[in-house]
Amino acid sequence: MSEPVLSVRDLRVAFPTRRRTLIAVDGVSFDIAAGEVLGVVGESGAGKSLTGAAIIGLLEPPGRIVGGEVRLGGQRIDDLAPEEIRKVRGKRIGMVFQDPLTSLNPLYRVGDQIVETIRTHARITEGKARERAITLLQEAGIQGARARIDSYPHEFSGGMRQRVVLALALCAEPDLLIADEPTTALDVSIQAQIIQLLKRLCRERGTAVMYAGRIAEIGPVRDVVQHPHHPYTKGLMGAIPTLGPQGERLVQIPGAMPRLDAIPKGCAFHPRCAYAFDRCRAERPEPMPAGPSMAACWLVAAGAAANAAPSAAASSARARL
């Protein structure tokens, strides 16, 4: 198998305080192959944005990586000096944030910003960079890109600004694109357009569910969405409203995400889980096979043991015969 574009192993992010060090991301591991999309879901505070920020070296102090490693195309990047990681960002990793205005300078035309980024990473003339910028805007869905390239950010709608940011993120042809809730600030119809645009640029293959800084479940999209194994994933999927005739009431997960200074012992989700038993309260589960997925849940282990028991009994009976 070819080497993954991104490999994250046992990533830990901590925030030192006067009293103690708080672990915000705790032992996260995953791989992303070329052409693969990994979607990360979870409540606010689960650690999604911090994981992305850690990968691209944009953690806000006093946050810092205290364990694990991040490799991009086989090269370790989590221990690079600030100047070196800046060279990686933009060139090899593109970024799309929630608010496009945080990525665009309001004082400069969008075309100038894209051209500058292209020329920072490629030795081409300004004219060729401008043509490349127009092509990128067209690919991002900006109609009349040749006329709009000299517009300022405030002259675009929110959805159009996010398309400009996407063109900006892709202008250096990066190996990896990280999008941190790129549709949150947009209305529903524009959200769908941006998602379709992202899906057109690559293909959808995997989903990871995060809770309290750890991966609760990871696997193929269809399996995680349609056949979730972790109770937290089931709660999230049950809370998604459906179009058409009104059906059953939406699922509500009781309680709230724990504070970083009050992560429960054992499985962090057990105080909110209707299926928790003694082992959940005492031991922290690691991701284990659950069909084509992996789920960090002792229910999965209990189910596997129950399924294996009849086979063991049958084998014993055959041995006696």
Image: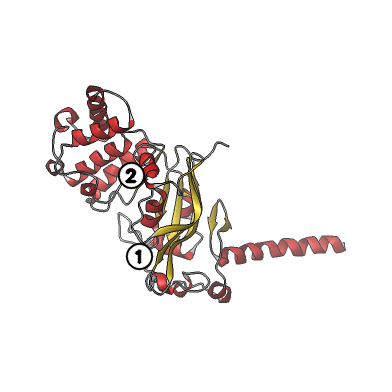
Residue 228 position within the rendered picture, expressed as x and y whole percent measured from the top left: 48, 58
Please tell me whether mark 2 or mark 1 is closer to you in this view.
Answer: 2
Q: Nearer the viewer, residue 315 or 231?
A: 231
Residue 278: image quadrant is bottom right
Badge 1 crowding class, 10 Å Cα cut-off, few under 14, some 14 to 19, many 20 or more, is some
| In this view, 35 is above or below 242 | above
Badge 2 crowding class, 10 Å Cα cut-off, few under 14, some 14 to 19, many 20 or more, is many
Q: Amino acid at mark 1?
A: Leu
| Residue 266 relative to residue 173: left or right | right
Q: Residue at position x 55%, y 36% from top? A: 2
| Residue 143 relative to residue 315: left or right | left
**Badge number at residue 119:** none
- Residue that carries the numbered disc 1 in the rendered image: 250
- Residue that carries the numbered disc 2 in the rendered image: 95
Residue 120 position within the rendered picture, expressed as x and y whole percent measured from the top left: 30, 33
Q: CA distance from mark 2 to mark 1?
A: 33 Å
Q: Amino acid at mark 2?
A: Met
Number of numbered discs: 2
Residue 68 position within the rendered picture, expressed as x and y whole percent measured from the top left: 51, 54
Q: Nearer the viewer, residue 35 or 121?
A: 121
Residue 152 position within the rendered picture, expressed as x and y whole percent measured from the top left: 13, 39
